Each structure stands twice: as structure tokens, then as C-alpha cells.
Amino acid sequence: MASLAWLLIPLFAAIGAAVWGSWAARDRTSGDISELAGYARFREAMDRPAGPDQASARSGADSV
């Protein structure tokens, strides 16, 4: 019985390694797409000229 227990240890280790390997190699591109879309919106917002309400807030901060 003890020899069977020693044979099961590598079996469980191999199963654990297979589960970890499949988890580590999963497809993660779906998160990248939403992050890139958010970055594109950020760049568009930074490229827009300041409106009148934003310009007054900036001029007040510069005078202090």
C-alpha cells in the first residue's frame, strides 16, 4: 500500500502541472481589446482643445 501512495504522488503532481499549464496558457486577448479602446478614448480626450469651462478652471489654477 505504501508503494501505491508513492506512485500516486507523481500522478497528482502531473495532473496539477497540466491544470496549471492550461490555466497559464489561456487566451487573454479579450481584456486587451477593452484596455486599448479605453486608451484610444483617453488619447482623443487629450487631443481635444479645452472648452470655455475648462479654460477658466485652468486660468484660475495658473494665477495662484
Image (cartoon, rainbow, N blue to C red):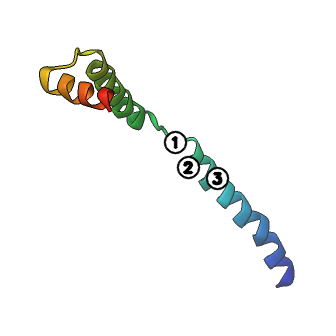
Q: What's the amino acid at mark 1?
A: Arg
Distance between the Cα atoms at labels 2 and 1? 5 Å
Distance between the Cα atoms at labels 3 and 2? 9 Å
| Residue denoted by label 1 | 26
Q: x, y percentage for residue 56?
A: 18, 26
* Label 1 packing within 10 angstroms: few (<14), some (14-19), many (20+): few
Quarter occupied by residue 45: top left
Question: Which circle, 3 or 1, is nearer the viewer?
Answer: 1
**SS for tag 2?**
helix
Q: Earlier in the sequence, mark 3 or mark 2?
A: 3
* Label 3 packing within 10 angstroms: few (<14), some (14-19), many (20+): few
Distance between the Cα atoms at labels 3 and 1? 12 Å
Does the CB distance between marks 3 and 2 fall below 8 Å? no
Q: What's the amino acid at mark 2?
A: Trp
Does the CB distance between marks 2 and 1 fall below 8 Å? yes
Q: Point out which mark residue 18 bears.
A: 3
- Look at 21% across and 19% down and name the residue there: 50
Q: Is residue 18 left or right of residue 11?
A: left
Q: Is residue 1 left or right of residue 52?
A: right
Quarter occupied by residue 4: bottom right
Q: What's the amino acid at mark 3?
A: Ala
Which residue, as the protein is rendered here, is positioned at the far left? 52
- Look at 57% across and 41% down and name the residue there: 25
